Amino acid sequence: RVSNGMDFSYPGYNEMLTGIADPRIDTNDPVPNPNVTVFEWLNRMEPFRGKAAAYATWSVFDAIFNRARSGLRICAGWRPEAACLGPPVPPNLKRLYETTTPYWRDNVWDSFMQAAVLEEIRQNRPRVLFVGYGETDEWAHLGRYDLYLESARQWDAFVRELWETMQAMPEYRGTTAFVLTTDHGRGSGFEEWKDHDTVVPGSSDMWIAALGPGVPAMGERRNAPTVTQAQIAATLAALLGEDYRRAFPAAAPVLPDLPGPGRP
């Protein structure tokens, strides 16, 4: 469940990445996040310093991760700079970013970001990586159920491509875990599925999936205990052997059934 009481993106990502629902985060405006995300916290530590990165289609992630303060390598939205596409910058990918007419000014195509993420993995070998896809939400808001389904199917293929790419690399094979989730739920019904907010039932219902070392293979859970979006931050740290709640005691605990420090 989303516990921030907002049921839209920036509050959801803040909750997910910091372990705390912050009532100050109440818009999607690109205001620098006053809270320290688990990615920023990890990036300050050895052996993660300089090895944490965030790639996302939505430009507001510059603010969510607080680019100026965090020191993270961030590629968000239509940003073809070398800082987030390489180095070296693949010339064809750079040209696509620079010359493609955007449909959404603040959101790049998932396929462009996927290509950039693959370059990040191959060139920089990050230890901790955030990847934020955005097309499903955009197509849903526009009422394009056909493209909503198509982009969801493509997202699944992108996740598989990332997994198989990393499992083929000795640095990641057998030591990499994925945590997959969403920033909010959405409504159901002929019209309500297009939206999410506090007035749209179902918007606080979300899902979390995980795979890799330290994650028991339980399949789709039935009658599982209710968990919150805020528990993801400590879980990410625990999968890396770190205790996020020791530094941030107010953060929510690690998800149940996952080993590691920071358990209640």
Image (cartoon, helix red, strand yellow):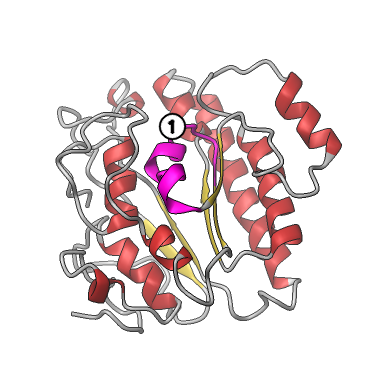
Q: Position of residue 209 (x, y in %)?
A: 42, 62
Describe residue 97's horizontal placement relative to residue 30 as left or right: right
User: In x, y percent, where is residue 179?
Assistant: 45, 63
Question: In percent of the image, x 66 and y 58: which residue is there?
Answer: 162
Q: Which residue is mark 1?
A: 137
Q: Is residue 252 above or below residue 83?
A: below
Residue 23 image-quadrant placement: top left
Residue 153 appears left or right of 67: right
Location of residue 17 in the rendering, given as x and y in whole percent from the top left corner: 34, 55
- The one nearer the camera, 28 or 256, is 28
Numbered disc total: 1
Residue at 57% in and 35% down? 151
In the displayed structure, 92 sits above or below 157; it is above
Q: Is residue 220 magenta?
A: no
Kindly state the secondary structure of the residue where label 1 is placed. helix
Q: Quadrant of the C terminus?
A: bottom left
Above or below, comparing residue 27 to residue 12 in the picture: above
| Of 45 and 125, the residue lying toward us | 45
Which of the 4 quarters of the picture holds residue 246? bottom left
Residue at (84, 34) in percent of width and height: 92
Nearer to the camera, 158 or 40: 40
Query: Label 1 is placed on what type of residue?
Result: Asp
What are the residue bounds of the magenta stretch? 55-71
